[in-house]
Image (spheres, helix red, strand yellow):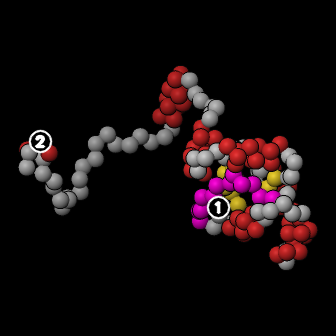
Amino acid sequence: MRSSKTLVFYPGTNKVTACNFLTRSVFECSPEVVGLLASWDEWASTAEIARAHGWSKADLNAVVPQLLDFSALITAGSPLAEQETQFSGQWNWGIPTALMHFCVQDSEFMTTEQAEARQVERAGHVAQPDLLLKNATGAIRLPNALDGE
């Protein structure tokens, strides 16, 4: 196993959001898991990783199935490993472009009727914003754009 080469991370408060853009798998994890994935960048067994970093094999065995489910870890010879190899050999536009491309490709969508029905349903129980907001007293007045000054 090794960590996926198509993971992107977004930091949050006491957590990190991870996305494997090839599988569209999104999950939250601790910064420690990010460290684990960063250190598992070459093909190695759980026992080898535990030995190399002084971690408990039992602790690793407890988290590995979840990381495999989220496609954060991949197994050698698996379809995902082949897909990553194909991606890395053909994609030349960088990770941000790959993230956007793979996450919007073949996305699910709503029909116009479904979107309108959802808006009507939400309008019944979500407070609507004021249509007009006044500046606070004491706010600096900007010149009128149409006065030409």
Residue 58 visible in the picture = no
Whether the magenta-drawn stretch holds residue 22 is answered as no
Asked which quadrant contains residue 11, the reply is bottom right
Q: Is residue 106 above or below residue 70?
A: above
Q: Which residue occupies 85% across, 75% down?
A: 52
Q: Position of residue 127 (x, y in %)?
A: 44, 42
Whether the magenta-drawn stretch holds residue 4 is answered as yes
Q: Which residues are magenta?
A: 2-13
Residue that carries the numbered disc 2 in the rendered image: 146
Q: Position of residue 27 (x, y in %)?
A: 70, 53
Residue that carries the numbered disc 1 in the rendered image: 16
Considering the numbered disc 1 on the image, is that residue within a helix, a strand or a loop? strand
Q: Which mark is residue 24?
A: none
Left or right of 148, for residue 121:
right
Q: Which residue occupies 63% across, 58% down?
A: 9
Front position in the image: 74 or 64: 74
Asked which quadrant contains residue 146, the reply is top left
Question: Could you tell me the amino acid type at mark 2?
Answer: Leu
Considering the numbered disc 2 on the image, is that residue within a helix, a strand or a loop? helix
Question: Could you tell me the amino acid type at mark 1?
Answer: Val
Which quarter of the figure is the N terminus placed in?
bottom right
